[in-house]
């Protein structure tokens, strides 16, 4: 997918963002905001059916079928130039280590860590060309691991390390790298977590996903010469688990 760098002298081209996880939660809020302001979207979908849904929801978006659970199979079309890559998709399935299956562990690592790493490598030439930005939507579990969260936390700790290394490597190319650490956010994933924990889910207690999306937009809209390496978001109400 190649497009012109502008439409005329002194005019800026719309920015293009590759986004995972646009089907729900934080990713959907972020896609809506970017689409509403006229930016170009490249949306990854795990199946053709989901790609069709996303294309209907975000007219004009370019969809790519890519299953993050199988990172060895990930391929991308020509996306030059690419102003940002927004890693939002993720999976969580709570289990204590004693009961955790190899398949559960592998899915967490593949979707939450290996797939973002592969997509980053595949898009580096295009992001370098645009002096663009990578945003990794991580989790507070990537900073502090709780019981039963070992697989998820391990994948998110790894994602933080990957982003830190990428940031140091790419600064000479003008590429900015930000990790966002939201705590519990009112998304379908959080509802699933509450069910697994045996808790009553009240979305009003947790961070609005739109707030996380606004934080990512702030990162993307920073002027040249400034960057936010990491930002943590927490609900006002303290939570002990």
Image (cartoon, helix red, strand yellow):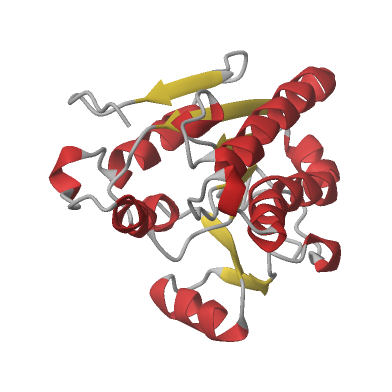
Between 32 and 233, the residue placed more toward the observer is: 233
Q: Which picture quadrant has residue 161?
A: top right
Between 57 and 70, the residue placed more toward the observer is: 70
Quarter of the picture holding the N terminus: bottom right
Taking the spot 63% from the left edge, 48% from the top edge, the residue there is 112
Q: Which picture quadrant has residue 170?
A: top right
Visible residue check, residue 11: no
Q: Position of residue 102 (x, y in %)?
A: 71, 58
Q: Position of residue 12 (x, y in %)?
A: 58, 42
Farthest front residue? 98
Q: Position of residue 215 (x, y in %)?
A: 39, 32
Between 186 and 148, the residue placed more toward the observer is: 148
Taking the spot 51% from the left edge, 72% from the top edge, the residue there is 60
Q: Position of residue 70 (x, y in %)?
A: 76, 66
Q: Against 86, is 133 above or below?
A: above
Between 49 and 198, the residue placed more toward the observer is: 198
């Amino acid at each position: 997918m190649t497009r012109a760098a502008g439409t005329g002298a002194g005019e800026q081209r719309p920015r293009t963002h590759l986004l995972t996880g646009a089907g729900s939660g934080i990713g959907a809020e972020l896609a809506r905001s970017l689409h509403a302001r006229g930016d170009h979207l490249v949306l990854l979908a795990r199946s053709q059916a989901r790609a069709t849904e996303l294309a209907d929801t975000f007219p004009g978006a370019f969809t790519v079928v890519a299953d993050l659970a199988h990172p060895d199979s990930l391929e991308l079309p020509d996306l030059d130039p690419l102003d940002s890559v927004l890693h939002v998709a993720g999976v969580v399935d709570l289990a204590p280590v004693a009961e955790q299956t190899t398949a559960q562990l592998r899915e967490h690592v593949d979707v939450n860590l290996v797939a973002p790493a592969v997509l980053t490598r595949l898009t580096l030439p295009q992001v370098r060309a645009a002096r663009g930005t990578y945003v990794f939507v991580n989790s507070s579990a990537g900073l502090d691991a709780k019981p039963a969260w070992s697989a998820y936390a391990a994948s998110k700790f790894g994602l933080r390390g990957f982003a830190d290394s990428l940031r140091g490597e790419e600064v000479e190319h003008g590429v900015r790298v930000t990790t966002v650490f939201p705590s519990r956010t009112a998304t379908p994933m959080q509802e699933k977590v509450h069910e697994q924990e045996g808790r009553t889910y009240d979305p009003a207690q947790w961070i609005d996903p739109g707030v996380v999306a606004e934080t990512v937009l702030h990162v993307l809209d920073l002027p040249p010469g400034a960057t936010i390496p990491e930002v943590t978001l927490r609900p006002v109400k303290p939570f002990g688990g």
